[in-house]
Image: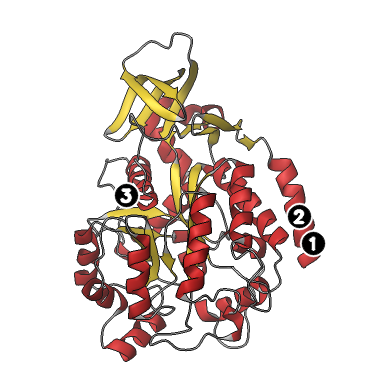
Amino acid sequence: MSHLFFENLLLPDGWARDVLVGVAAGRVARVTVGAAPGEADIHAIGLPGLRNLHSHTFQRAMAGLAEYRGAGEDNFWSWREQMYRFALTMTPEDVQAAAAQAFVEMLESGFTGVAEFHYLHHQPDGTPYANIAEMAERVAAAADEAGISLLLLPVFYAHSNFGGAAPVAGQRRFINNLDAFGKLYGKCQALAPAGVAPHSLRAVTPAELAALVALGKDRPFHIHISEQVKEVADCEAWSGMRPVEWLLGHATVDERWCLIHATHVTPAERDGIAATGAVAGLCPITEANLGDGVFPAKAYAGAFGVGTDSNVLIDAAAELRQLEYAQRLVRLQRNVLTAAAPAAGTSLWLGAAAGGAKASGVPGGIRVGAAADFVTLDVARLGPVAEQGAETALNAAVFASRGPMVDCVWVGGKKIVEGGRHGQAARVRAAFDAMLRRRL
């Protein structure tokens, strides 16, 4: 057993002083509060690693390239057309390079795990690769390369809109029928811990959704839901019901579900999500970038986590900051999301750590049996503010820092980031830049 000593450590029930953590076989084996450090590695401020509950890593390659206004009014749907065009050019090697870069950036910002919502499956013309899991294998290889904990979520995508509408040309690399998807899912299970992800109610029929629920059994089950106003209107035109309303009425949503975005919900839908035990998967930076809207987080009593979605900017603390700031703008208040603690940074980190773990199907927080995933803050860079206590230091790291205030990151007990830098960052970045130059 190896040991780490934290002068301040954020445990599931709050901050604790002088904590000795024993690590064995990649998991937390012992947590002793009020201990002496002994021969342990000593750190000032420790946090549980966050699980990024929603990512499309291939989109990291187009970050910054879609910030131009087209003809007419730009919105999510015009951005989607640009994304489709970019996606149609990427090779398996390109996808691996983009994923590795995204995973390194996640780790350097405090994410120790990621749920990769993977839907770029086939060749550019839509023909399946000889190995149907070719692209999934590239994502898993990138995760191994970076050292991040991966939940692989192969995405079932069959239709372009509600009611089983035929897919459009830009979606041809995403499309599978249920038989092909079953084969893909089986291969993904051999690559990494895996779950099932119907893309959205737009992309599946009710019968297909029921089949996917049965296929997933007790594994994590993620779905995009109610992200856009047009999506709500299209669902009402198809079914007479709103997306979340339809889902809660036609599927057995429970604690293994993660509803991504759920941006446009009524109070009854919001409360219905909480009552199921499902996780609201919020992606604040992407939702702001795409003009999606703001989830009513203050009035929501259920579990939540954060994801980087389009990976236009990868920064765990920035996702929490954007989540809180959006609520402040809507409600004209400050320190809104403070249910778990009066300090906003502490409350946000604890909530996102618990919800991200739940959505990933793993134990959350720093506790015996959980993965030994830790993040430490760089107290030297935070300066005198860190001397005011761990809560103030975390507040500063979330709200008053120009970049991630991360010092070290461990995944499964292995130190991956030290001094804020991933050990393979330079090599991974060089490969990513070379790929991007070819693509551009």
Alpha carbon separation for disc pair 2 and 3 = 39 Å
Q: Quadrant of the C terminus?
A: bottom right
x%, y% of residue 139?
60, 55
- Residue 437 got which mark? 1
| Marks 2 and 3, the one that precedes in the sequence | 3
- How crowded pointer 3 is (Cα within 10 Å; few <14, some 14-19, many 20+) is rated as some
- How crowded pointer 2 is (Cα within 10 Å; few <14, some 14-19, many 20+) is rated as some
Circle 1 SS class:
helix
- Residue 288 got which mark? none
Q: Quadrant of the N terminus?
A: top left
Alpha carbon separation for disc pair 1 and 2 = 6 Å
Circle 2 SS class:
helix
Q: What amino acid type should be assigned to the residue bearing mark 2?
A: Asp
Q: What amino acid type should be assigned to the residue bearing mark 3?
A: Asn
Q: Horizontal placement of 358 versus 75: left or right?
A: left
Residue annotated with mark 3: 335
Residue at the (36%, 53%) spot, across then down? 359
- Residue 433 got which mark? 2
The answer to whether mark 1 and mark 2 are in CB contact below 8 A is: yes
Q: Is residue 241 above or below residue 414?
A: below
Q: Horizontal placement of 168 versus 223: left or right?
A: right
Looking at the image, the residue that sits furthest to the bottom is 237
Q: Is residue 262 visible?
A: no
Which tag is nearer the camera, tag 2 or tag 3? 2
